[in-house]
């Protein structure tokens, strides 16, 4: 494990930080370099890489037997394909104009990567919830991926062109207005800003009524049941009086079923305890004390998501005082961000640390067990992981069942949330000045979203045809 940064950070010297007027001038000057209307541009280009070849390249570092699940999930719809195609889209985004104003970006800011989770104070918070691709980069790329995901999801739900346009414009406008609001706030107030579940409706111009409000209330109520006790009942059972993770191959495979025998299993279990100790060192001292009150009892490989399928993900069951006092941790493999090919190598040698630092920069509050580690995998190769709780009041929206009103409200909340995340690490005053008060930027991004949604549909059909021809193996049932 290493926590060494490749490039050191430093605090600005007194007088180095520009004043507000200079930051406003910087934002407005960026319009000359990248006109706001120019964000409509998207051209695939003859040199655009084959999207399936890019996906197969990613697959070279993943668990081979899990790749058919990934392709099967991505083939299910154009929206599912977009979720798994962060690398092909990154190549497209790299060809578009940028203002030169950088922030810590999510790198994969689509609709399904926002959701609910618990704060350490046990409040239900809405925020970005996936940071596998996070790096410093152009803020526009996050906004465009979010807007494109709205357009693709709206097409998937058979909304009319006018309805889709209204929803995308509302999402981008929410980002723009929020950034202008954050530009007028004190720095600490921006850092403390967050979206509680019980105040989400105040962040949108849409008023949810009747069945839509009941659906929202059901989602927040369900999130509160997605806790460690619920996970114990869902994923574990008693074996000879001891709690053990249940097998659901290929989605959940206990370590005992992956090991070659009792000797191998004992060696692996010992290795995992060393891993847990190394991960422990990345936690704050008081959280190490908390972790030390639990003991590791079982581990399983788990498959989650769409784009992440094939990466190595481990579910760790720890128990506290008794069998009814569980803690579930998730160790998720972290490789280089798909954006690093276009923005430069991360300053962090450990990709797990890259994810953790990015998450802490962008989220209003983060999991108290968030940490990272480097380990030798089952194949003997060193791999980076980040660790967090598997379930802690986590909840997500069902995008495919949203009405037009519901998707617009959700898009606006996501736009506000993304702006708040960018305002924490970027120059919010320059960004607000660049965006301005009219809808020029919104209209440009809407045009981009439509153009890339067309490209995404072509890429999706290419995958479907490759599966039909036998070029790519896919499991549609997983």
Image: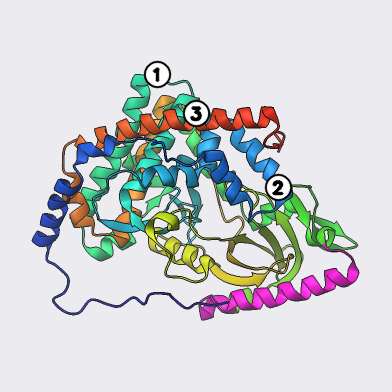
Q: Distance between the residues labelled 1 and 3?
A: 20 Å
Disc 2 and disc 3 in contact, CB within 8 angstroms: no
Q: Quadrant of residue 295?
A: bottom right
Q: Which of 454 and 354 is in front in this view?
A: 454
Label 2: element kind: helix
State the residue position of label 3: 458
Q: How far apart are marks 2 and 1 (CA)?
A: 37 Å
In the image, is residue 268 part of the stretch drawn in magenta? yes
**What is the crowding at mark 3: few (fewer than 14 residues within 10 Å), some, or many (at least 20)?**
few
Counting from the top left corner in percent of width and height, residue 56 is at 60, 45
Q: Mark 1 against mark 3, which lies toward the viewer?
A: 3
Q: Which of marks 2 and 3 is nearer the N terminus?
A: 2
| Relative to 305, 11 lies left or right | left
Q: Mark 2 against mark 1, which lies toward the viewer?
A: 2
| Relative to 165, 359 lies left or right | right
State the residue position of label 2: 66
Q: Mark 2 against mark 3, which lies toward the viewer?
A: 3
Boundaries of the magenta span? 259-288
State the residue position of label 1: 160
Counting from the top left corner in percent of width and height, residue 20 is at 12, 62
Q: Can you say whether 61 is above or below 318 in the image?
A: above
Disc 2 and disc 1 in contact, CB within 8 angstroms: no
The coloring applied to the image is: rainbow
């Amino acid at each position: 494990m290493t926590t060494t940064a490749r490039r050191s950070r430093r605090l600005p010297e007194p007088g180095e930080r520009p004043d507000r007027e200079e930051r406003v001038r910087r934002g407005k000057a960026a319009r000359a370099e990248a006109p706001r209307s120019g964000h409509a541009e998207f051209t695939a280009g003859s040199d655009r890489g084959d999207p399936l070849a890019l996906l197969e390249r990613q697959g070279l570092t993943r668990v081979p037997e899990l790749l058919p699940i990934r392709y099967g999930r991505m083939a299910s719809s154009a929206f599912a394909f977009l979720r798994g195609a962060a690398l092909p889209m990154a190549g497209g985004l790299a060809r578009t104009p940028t203002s030169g104003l950088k922030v810590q970006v999510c790198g994969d800011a689509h609709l399904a990567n926002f959701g609910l989770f618990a704060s350490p104070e046990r409040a239900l918070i809405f925020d970005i919830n996936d940071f596998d691709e996070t790096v410093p980069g152009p803020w526009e790329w996050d906004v465009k991926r979010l807007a494109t995901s709205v357009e693709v999801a709206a097409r998937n739900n058979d909304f009319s062109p006018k309805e889709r346009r209204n929803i995308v414009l509302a999402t981008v406008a929410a980002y723009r207005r929020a950034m202008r609001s954050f530009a007028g706030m004190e720095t600490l107030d921006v850092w403390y800003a967050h979206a509680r579940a019980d105040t989400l409706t105040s962040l949108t111009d849409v008023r949810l009524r009747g069945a839509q409000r009941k659906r929202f209330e059901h989602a927040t109520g369900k999130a509160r049941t997605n806790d460690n006790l619920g996970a114990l009942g869902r994923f574990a059972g008693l074996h000879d009086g001891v709690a053990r993770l249940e097998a659901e191959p290929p989605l959940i495979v206990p370590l005992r079923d992956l090991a070659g025998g009792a000797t191998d299993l004992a060696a692996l279990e010992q290795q995992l305890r060393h891993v847990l100790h190394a991960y422990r060192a990345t936690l704050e001292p008081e959280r190490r004390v908390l972790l030390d009150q639990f003991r590791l009892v079982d581990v399983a490989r788990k498959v989650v998501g769409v784009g992440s399928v094939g990466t190595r993900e481990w579910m760790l069951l720890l128990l506290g005082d008794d069998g009814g006092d569980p803690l579930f941790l998730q160790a998720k493999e972290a490789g280089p961000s798909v954006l690093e090919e276009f923005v430069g190598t991360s300053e962090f040698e450990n990709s797990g640390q890259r994810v953790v630092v990015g998450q802490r920069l962008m989220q209003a509050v983060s999991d108290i067990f968030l940490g990272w580690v480097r380990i030798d995998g089952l194949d003997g190769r060193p791999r980076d992981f980040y660790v967090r709780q598997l379930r802690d009041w986590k909840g997500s929206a069902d995008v495919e069942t949203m009405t037009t009103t519901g998707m617009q409200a959700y898009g606006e909340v996501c736009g506000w949330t993304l702006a708040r995340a960018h305002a924490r690490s970027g120059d919010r005053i320059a960004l607000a000045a660049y965006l301005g008060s009219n809808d020029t930027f919104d209209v440009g991004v809407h045009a981009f979203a439509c153009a890339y949604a067309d490209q995404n549909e072509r890429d999706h059909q290419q995958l479907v045809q490759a599966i039909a021809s036998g070029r790519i193996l896919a499991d549609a049932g997983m």
